Amino acid sequence: MSDEENKTNIAKYLIEAFERRDEKKLREIRVVLWLNFLGPRSSFRELRLYEVSEDFSTFAIYGIRIEISAYTFLKNLVAIEIERGYFVNFDLIDDEIWNTFIKNVLNGQKPRVIMGESFKRNFGLPEVLSDLDIYVLQFRC
């Protein structure tokens, strides 16, 4: 099976699990996130360059990688980025948008997401949207 066929099969599996909200599958799927702490606008002098992976570097005051279940991910998701700077609210996401988002992740584009207040509280994250970027690095099935 080619790499492209493998990505297509993974994408289909993920889309089906996300669309159907299949709790069993969602608890097995892992979502790897990069939390990029930006801090207040006055903190620009404190930014450091983080080498997250071979093909992804970002400036932040601090950054961490976390792995959560897709169940937790979907339960707390507010919006997903399908193009640079273009976010779609969770309520409007359909098969086509999931397909675009998942393929972006599988192709290494690392789109951002906006997570809900309870997720931010549970992880002790800043509540102000401009102080935090959350990137989806990969899905693990």
Image: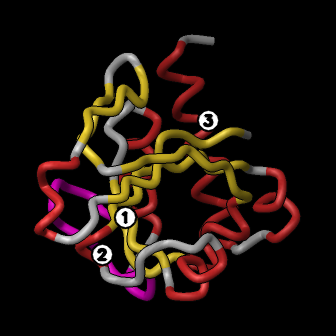
Highlighted range, magenta = 81-92
**Alpha-carbon neighbours of circle 1 within 10 Å: few (<14), some, or many (≥20)?**
some
Q: Residue at x 18, y 66 (%)?
A: 86
Q: CA distance from mark 2 to mark 3?
A: 24 Å
Out of 64 and 83, give the one closest to the viewer.
Answer: 64
Q: Identify residue type, mark 3.
A: Asn
Q: Which residue is mark 1?
A: 97
Snapshot quadrant of residue 84: bottom left
Give the x, y percent position of residue 3.
Answer: 52, 15
| Up/down of 52 relative to 38, above or below | above
Snapshot quadrant of residue 26: bottom right
Give the x, y percent position of residue 56.
Answer: 32, 29
Q: Residue at x 59, y 78 (%)?
A: 119
Residue 82 counted in the magenta span: yes
**Alpha-carbon neighbours of circle 3 within 10 Å: few (<14), some, or many (≥20)?**
few
Check contact, mark 2 vs mark 3: CB within 8 A: no
Q: CA distance from mark 1 to mark 2?
A: 8 Å
Closer to the chain start, of discs 2 and 3, is: 3
Residue 9 is labelled as 3
Give the x, y percent position of residue 81.
Answer: 30, 62
Q: Nearer the viewer, mark 1 or mark 2?
A: 2
